[in-house]
Image (cartoon, helix red, strand yellow):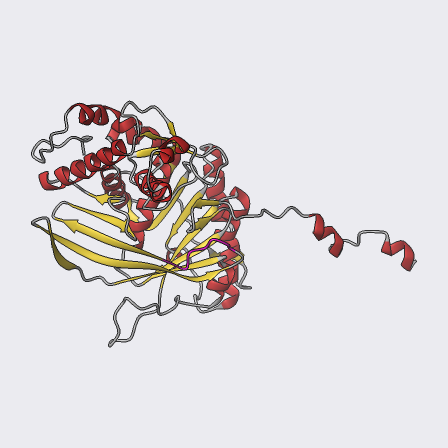
């Protein structure tokens, strides 16, 4: 009898040797390099007013349109924003500001966003929308009801929309139970973010609030997530978004700018290589516009350049990026050129590749990566080909007549 059982697979038990045949990817696949891995649940927490909703909205718009907030995007991705703390009007404003910031026209952005972005938000009587109920209800025995989540999954399947990223803003809006209960925290996770990840095969970014700081402390310090520690235990990784709600004034090129430093710190990373422990961003703005910058990169995101100064600043930055690309030997007509040819004529090949990658993050260049760790070819982005041709003919630099897309 014992010999017969040893040759059979007992239900519920896996033999240790079978695990040696399981395919494990050598590297973590990312939808946003170093920040968002595929098929994981990630938590991003901060104090109120730091800007996590605006930051993640810019991230979603950038991924849907092929841009990035200073971080490489392996490929254009589909995103679903569950903005449960904002009305449709608030989300629309954030999205429109992000579109202008990336230098896209409304019609150009409409095609990409219709294909790659969906939004669920609070009902807005002016818009006539009625948002589906995503609250996780708890039964008398403490079990979580996942029926609302499954209704959302059916809506997405009916729309034939399969997101790569879902942003849940925020956790407190869907939790009807006791946030300090570890049992209900696990039930909430399984009924919403965990179920979305498993059923749709996507990454879920959960936004959460941190505990209130002491009166004698500022908001730039991490104070841990609100509620049960099981919220943090259930997710694969945690980012802390720290900063200050106050802004500083600086003078640059004769213009007064308002700046604020924010910082992403890794609070947990479960089996993720190439995971950056810290990312620093700088929010810069003036009346009518602002932008996010990552580390020492420039002009990776703009907010609402509606004034003349804002339009001129955006156009000037785009023009400067195009001039830089042309100086490296990038053809002005959008013809791709290999990185090998570019490095052959450079005194600093490694430094050149870093600068080219920076222009890719800014949206000036497009890069083709057919499985290689580095782009094989670079080209002027199709949106800027006309401006590049004009710059190659006319080298005059007049900020009163900026060259660039309508913003």
Percent from the top left, x then y, of residue 272?
A: 51, 55
Judge from the rendering whether residue 390 lies leftward or rightward of residue 296; answer left or right: left
Judge from the rendering whether residue 4 lies leftward or rightward of residue 371; answer left or right: right
Viewer-side residue, 291 vs 53: 291
Viewer-side residue, 267 vs 391: 391
Q: Residue at x 87, y 55 (%)?
A: 5
Residue 174 vs 78, above or below: the answer is: below
Percent from the top left, x then y, of residue 309?
A: 10, 41
Which residues make up the magenta segment? Answer: 272-278
Q: Residue at x 30, y 36 (%)?
A: 363
- Does the rendering let one see residue 139? no
Residue 219 vs 374, above or below: the answer is: below
Percent from the top left, x then y, of residue 82?
A: 38, 47
Percent from the top left, x then y, of residue 358?
A: 31, 42
- Does the rendering let one see residue 344? yes
Q: Could you say which quadrant of the image residue 327 lies in?
A: top left
Viewer-side residue, 249 vs 399: 399
Q: How many marks?
A: 0
Q: Does residue 338 belong to the magenta stretch?
A: no
Q: Residue at x 9, y 33 (%)?
A: 398
Q: Does residue 277 belong to the magenta stretch?
A: yes
Q: Residue at x 92, y 58 (%)?
A: 1
């Amino acid at each position: 009898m014992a010999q017969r059982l040893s040759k059979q697979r007992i239900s519920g038990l896996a033999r240790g040797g079978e695990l040696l045949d399981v395919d494990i990817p050598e590297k973590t696949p990312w939808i946003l390099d170093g920040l968002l891995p595929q098929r994981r649940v990630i938590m991003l927490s901060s104090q109120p007013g730091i800007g996590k909703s605006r930051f993640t909205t810019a991230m979603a718009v950038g991924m849907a349109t092929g841009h990035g907030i200073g971080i490489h995007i392996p490929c254009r991705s589909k995103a679903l924003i569950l903005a449960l703390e904002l009305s449709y009007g608030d989300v629309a404003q954030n999205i429109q500001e992000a579109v202008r910031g990336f230098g896209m026209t409304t019609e150009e952005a409409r095609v990409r966003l219709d294909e790659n972005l969906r939004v669920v938000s609070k009902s807005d009587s002016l818009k006539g929308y009625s948002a589906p109920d995503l609250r996780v209800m708890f039964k008398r025995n403490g079990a979580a009801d996942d029926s609302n989540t499954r209704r959302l999954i059916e809506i997405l399947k009916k729309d034939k929309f399969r997101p790569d990223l879902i942003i849940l803003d925020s956790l407190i809006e869907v939790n009807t139970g006791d946030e300090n209960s570890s049992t209900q925290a696990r039930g909430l996770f399984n009924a919403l973010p965990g179920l979305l990840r498993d059923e749709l095969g996507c990454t879920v970014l959960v936004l959460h609030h941190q505990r209130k700081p002491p009166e004698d402390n500022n908001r730039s310090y991490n104070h841990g997530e609100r509620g049960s520690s099981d919220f943090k235990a259930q997710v694969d990784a945690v980012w802390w978004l720290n900063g200050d709600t106050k802004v500083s004034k600086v003078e640059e090129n004769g213009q007064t700018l308002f700046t604020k430093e924010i910082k992403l710190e890794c609070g947990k990373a479960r089996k993720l290589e190439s995971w950056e422990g810290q990312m620093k961003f700088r929010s810069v703005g003036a009346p009518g516009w602002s932008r996010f910058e990552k580390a020492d990169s420039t002009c990776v995101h703009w907010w609402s350049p509606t004034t003349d100064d804002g339009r001129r600043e955006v156009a000037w930055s785009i023009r400067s990026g195009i001039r830089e690309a042309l100086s490296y030997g990038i053809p002005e007509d959008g013809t791709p050129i290999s990185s090998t040819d570019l490095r052959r004529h450079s005194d600093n090949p490694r430094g050149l590749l870093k600068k080219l990658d920076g222009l890719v993050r800014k949206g000036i260049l497009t890069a083709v990566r057919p499985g290689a760790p580095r782009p094989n070819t670079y080209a002027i982005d199709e949106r800027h080909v006309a401006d590049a041709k004009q710059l190659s003919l006319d080298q005059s630099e007049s900020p009163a007549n900026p060259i660039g897309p309508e913003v």
